[in-house]
Image (cartoon, grey):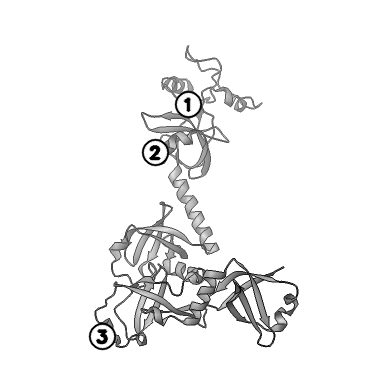
Amino acid sequence: MAKFKNGFTLVLPDPQFDYLFDQPKCKYNTNVKLHKDDNSNTRILCKESYAQELYNKYNRVSGCLNVASKDLVSGDIYSVSIKKLDVDNKMAYCEELSSKTLVIVPFSEFKTSDVDMMSRTSFKVITTLNANGAIYGSIKKYQKVESFDVLGKLHKENTPFDVKIVELVKGGFIAKYNSNVDCFLPGAHAAPNVIYNFESYIGKTVSVMVDNFDKFSNLFVVSHKKFIKNEIPKRINNLEFGKRYRGTLTSNPSKIGLFIEFEGIFTGLVHMFDFKDYNEETRHLRSGDEVDIYIKNVSIKDNGEYRINLTLNAESVDQTSLCYQEYKNKLVGGEYDYEYSEKTQQFVILSGGKPACTLNIPHNSIKKYLDVYKLVCVTDVDVIGKQVYFDFLK
């Protein structure tokens, strides 16, 4: 298709476009004298006086695609498929699927390995009309719009996603989602705790959630801290009592103890009372130092947030929590005999004929199961909540 400022289009023949010219009201210029090598099916829609001159010029251009006359709206999204690859000029000549209009897509819009693949399938572009009237398509612009829409959906659904930090700016970072949409990540929200070296974050990939959308700058504001707050309740039960973790001090020793970050999202406190001589034992420690820690206990605050108490000594771990941790490690997924004492209201799960877990359960809550079911299957153990979940089996 050749489109000109005067608003008409010159069309060359192709059998697959015949239906466009078979309409009852479709009239074309029969006065244009065709080139001797041109076939008799060529039809010219332009009826302006200079149609002959333009045909002569257009006819001298070799290798042009035969296309249909159809105006596409600049800035809109269209589906296209590749019809011809111009390797010399690094252009893919494409066809808009519904109108058969020519859309030119530069090779730079493709991933290098995608050109051959794209020639066998359809894909979407955003169109742009250049000064000469040719229609160009951009895959990258479409993908950016698509990613922007996806971010809006992720914001609405409160769903986490990953961004890559690419630039340090005033107040925080510019981070890219899906390599094509810029987001603003405030410095105070880029890590679980204080950042001492902002430059070290360039190039990092972090998990975030959308905090809000800044209409003035047209940027999504994202937060790693919001991701952490959302993620901790999902992962808190994966913490293991008795396991040694490697943690990092988030600051110099404070007046109440050591604040330590571990496993990427958790922050806990080793209280000063966990030491015999706090000042002496911690005087060599500084922010960023790594230490071995254990989960001492975990409690839930009134606002639903978790308080994680840590210790440097394995012997200081809460013994009841260790007991439930053992239940979780050894019993979950297994089927067991059990005993129940109505007098003491103790429910004892047996493993190998020996007591493996003792629970206090009121008789009236399970009496209807006792004479019917002979086995139990332990389905889960909530170590923090001190709960053992099981099903009765016949």
Which one is in front, 368 or 358? 358
Which one is in front, 378 or 151? 378
Quarter location, residue 276: bottom left
Which one is in front, 290 or 25? 290
Q: Which mark is residue 280?
A: 3
Query: Which amino acid type is marked by label 1?
Result: Leu
Which one is in front, 38 or 226? 226
Q: Which mark is residue 112?
A: 2
Horizontal and vertical percent for residue 157?
55, 62
Quarter location, residue 202: bottom left
Marks 2 and 1, how far apart at CA: 24 Å
On screen, 127 above or below 230?
A: above
Horizontal and vertical percent for residue 74?
48, 42
Q: Is residue 130 visible?
A: no
Horizontal and vertical percent for residue 286?
27, 76
Q: Which mark is residue 65?
A: 1
First in sequence: mark 2 or mark 1?
1
What residue is rendered at 40% in x and 68% in y? 263
SS at mark 2 in the image: helix
